[in-house]
Image: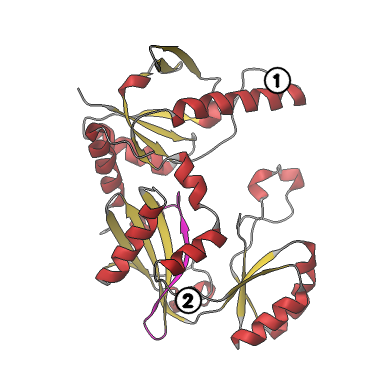
Amino acid sequence: MSKRILIVTRRADIHADLVAERLTAKDNPPFRLDLDAFPVEYDLALSFADGRWSGELRHAPSGACLPVDDIGAVWIRKSADFAFASELSAQEKAYAIGETRHILSGLLHGIDAYWMSHPSAIRASQWKGEQLARAARFGFRVPPSLITSSKDAVLAFRQAVGGDIVFKTMESPFLAADEVGDEDRIASGIATTRIDADQDDMLDAVGELPCFFQQYVPKRHEIRATVIGERLFAAKIHSQDDVRTQVDFRNYAAPVRYEATQLPEEIEQRCLDYVHSYGLNYGAIDLIVDEAGEYVFLENNPGGQFLFVEQRAPALRMLDALADRLIVGANAGVMNA
């Protein structure tokens, strides 16, 4: 009998919806754990005996049941706030969140399964400062970068690199807008921003907290290299075709061309080795191809979106590849923790 695939996400997740459809069509219907409906819509019953945990997770509205012994693969997609059955005081809610997180993490971390990807690996891989140092060790070119809370240091950095620089957020391009209610939201986010002499007055805000700056690299185009298991799917993004995407390609209103491309063998292997060095089975790497044709590393997102790439470059069949990799991993009994 085939092992089951567990998808951990939230209710509004089109990636999970589409991969689940493909898994079901391949006779491997997954069990979906939507964290923003847990624990209110789920029943969890676990017991420890003879050195191991056993039991099941049941989705009450649908009746779907998942014995934990049957889990062969886990896809960690999205996090979300938990949902409880009743209104809780501030202290009650803090306690409930902590207990629920602890119990669920204890269950997930103890599963002997194929992971896309293990929570420990995801967490270890998400720090962008460490990413840059690791990328350099793997042979990538990494632009000169600066973390500072000093305006003078930023000005000196720009002079040292001999050209424009960019400001980037490290944690959230949404400026934490997704962490507060509508009444407290003052901005929706900020793209990577080019800083030249005309923006020097913006740098007065640097003293509030450490900020990240990087040399601006003129580019031919950009690459999104998505690693799924042992495969790499590369998309060439013609970001320089539209003024709105020349600094940051993430303006999806601009009709920028995406096309499937093949990376040089050395660069492809470097991307795969880099992602796997964290113990990850998934990664979304952003690269620049500069005006001289050199590949420049920007960052890796261990849970990055890929559907927008496939929609614009349909030859990159990543939904099918991810579903197939989960099926193979579930039934290989691989332990990638």
**Residue 296 lies in magenta, yes or no?**
yes
| Callouts 1 and 2 close, C-beta under 8 Å | no
Up-down: is 300 above or below 303? below
**Residue placed at 45% from the left, 11% from the top?**
47
Q: Residue furthest front?
A: 51
331 vs 228, left or right, is left
Residue at 50%, 76% (x, y): give it. 246
Badge 1: residue crowd in 10 Å (few <14, some 14–19, many ≥20): few
Find residue 144 and report its horizontal and vertical position in percent.
56, 76
**Lateral position of residue 129 relative to residue 321, left or right:** right
Query: At numbered mark 2, what does the secondary structure look like: helix, strand or loop?
Result: loop
Q: Residue 60, relative to residue 272: is it above or below?
A: above
Q: Residue at x 51, y 20 (%)?
A: 41
Badge 2 density bin: few <14, some 14–19, many ≥20, Cα 10 Å:
some
Residue 293: x and y, percent? 36, 82
For label 1, the SS is loop
* Kind of residue sitting beneath label 1: Glu
Q: Which residue is mark 1?
A: 87
- In the picture, the quarter occupied by the N terminus is top left
Asked if one can make out residue 251 in the rendered structure from this viewpoint, the answer is no
Q: Which residues are magenta?
A: 291-306
Residue 123 in the image, given as x and y percentages of width and height: 51, 46
Closer to the camera in the image, 188 or 105: 105
Report which residue position mark 2 lands on: 242
